[in-house]
């Protein structure tokens, strides 16, 4: 396991100033999420709700791993001065967004959809603008990866698919914002959670898209540690992308249909199960190859 972790670190460690900036932004956000998880455990307040410690924890962790994932993406792109543009927008934007959310929780105010006071309204407005900048940074990384990617073909598939999933997740996020503001206009209070229709899990659909880059990226890194033939890499990664896309489509379709994710329609359920099975199968193959590689290396050392 130590050998595998060391190889993974060599694949993702930052080597340029732009990458180090993103790395430290991600580290700061992950540390903030961890600290607030401890605060949540000590405070023992409800985990759910418009004002809860869940938001600093979840948003800190999510934006933190996004920044770290962007380091891996940049490792496979040519060094360019203008790379500071997407790196700064993503790293700094993530820090500002999570800082706003965290500040509102410490103030005892809702961070999302809150327009009761002028200051809260300004915070919500800034958060919306920052998210647009983060989405723009993701779009820049996507175009850059399509034009000048220098990694393996399998890694390129993972990066492009993962970045597209993030952008799709952003579209769902803006739909969630519209739904939340509509609830505030209709009821005069910030909703505890946002759903599409009766019970559609907007959060789950948003989260699945946000973290596709990490799932597919880890599989691409695993394939790169013990290189199978290039065609095999591409086929396995294509299977993982199709599987993850099917799972994402299933969860999203269920959410927009207003159904709970635990009770989807028959077709979305079959699609989701097939997608999850495909991703799991590729994960097992990659894990097995890595395990065999470690065992062979140990055997060689003992000879």
Image (cartoon, rainbow, N blue to C red):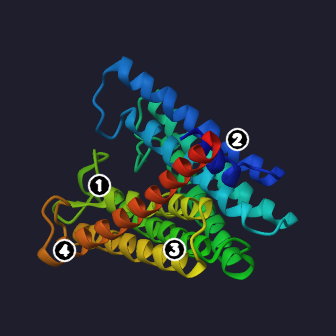
State the residue position of label 3. 161
Label whose residue precedes the other's in the sequence (3 or 4): 3
**Residue 290 - label:** none
Q: What is the spatial separation of the Cα atoms under label 3 and label 4, in whole angstroms?
A: 22 Å
Tell us which disc is closer to us: 4 or 1. 4
Q: Quadrant of the C terminus?
A: top right
Residue 189 shown left or right of residue 127 in the figure: left
Give yes or no for contact between labels 2 and 4 (Cβ–Cβ under 8 Å): no
Q: Residues within 10 Å of mark 1 (few under 14, many from 20)?
A: many
Q: Is residue 214 above or below residue 55?
A: below
**Residue 270 - label:** 4
Q: What is the spatial separation of the Cα atoms under label 4 and label 1, in whole angstroms?
A: 26 Å
Q: Residue at x 35, y 66 (%)?
A: 281
State the residue position of label 2. 24
**Residue 194 - label:** 1
Label whose residue precedes the other's in the sequence (1 or 2): 2
């Amino acid at each position: 396991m130590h050998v595998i972790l060391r190889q993974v670190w060599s694949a993702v460690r930052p080597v340029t100033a732009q990458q180090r900036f993103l790395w430290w932004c991600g580290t700061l956000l992950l540390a903030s999420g961890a600290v607030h998880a401890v605060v949540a455990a000590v405070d023992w307040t409800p985990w759910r709700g418009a004002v809860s410690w869940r938001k600093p924890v979840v948003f800190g962790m999510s934006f933190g791993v996004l920044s770290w994932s962007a380091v891996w993406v940049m490792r496979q792109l040519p060094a360019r001065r203008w790379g500071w543009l997407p790196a700064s927008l993503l790293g700094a934007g993530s820090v500002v967004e999570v800082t706003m959310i965290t500040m509102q929780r410490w103030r005892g105010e809702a961070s999302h959809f809150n327009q009761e006071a002028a200051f809260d309204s300004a915070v919500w407005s800034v958060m919306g603008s920052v998210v647009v900048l983060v989405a723009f940074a993701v779009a820049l990384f996507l175009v850059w990866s399509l034009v000048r990617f220098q990694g393996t073909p399998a890694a390129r598939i993972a990066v492009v698919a993962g970045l597209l999933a993030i952008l799709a997740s952003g579209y769902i996020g803006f739909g969630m914002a519209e739904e939340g503001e509509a609830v505030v206009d209709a009821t005069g209070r910030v909703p505890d959670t946002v759903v599409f229709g009766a019970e559609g899990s907007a959060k789950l659909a948003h989260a699945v898209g946000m973290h596709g880059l990490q799932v597919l990226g880890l599989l691409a890194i695993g394939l790169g540690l013990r290189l199978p033939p290039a065609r095999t890499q591409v086929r396995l990664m294509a299977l993982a992308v199709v599987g993850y896309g099917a799972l994402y489509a299933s969860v999203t379709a269920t959410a927009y249909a207003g159904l709970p994710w635990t009770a989807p329609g028959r077709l979305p359920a079959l699609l989701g199960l097939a997608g999850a099975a495909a991703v799991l199968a590729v994960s097992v193959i990659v894990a097995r190859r890595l395990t065999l590689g470690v065992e062979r290396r140990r055997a060689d050392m003992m000879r």
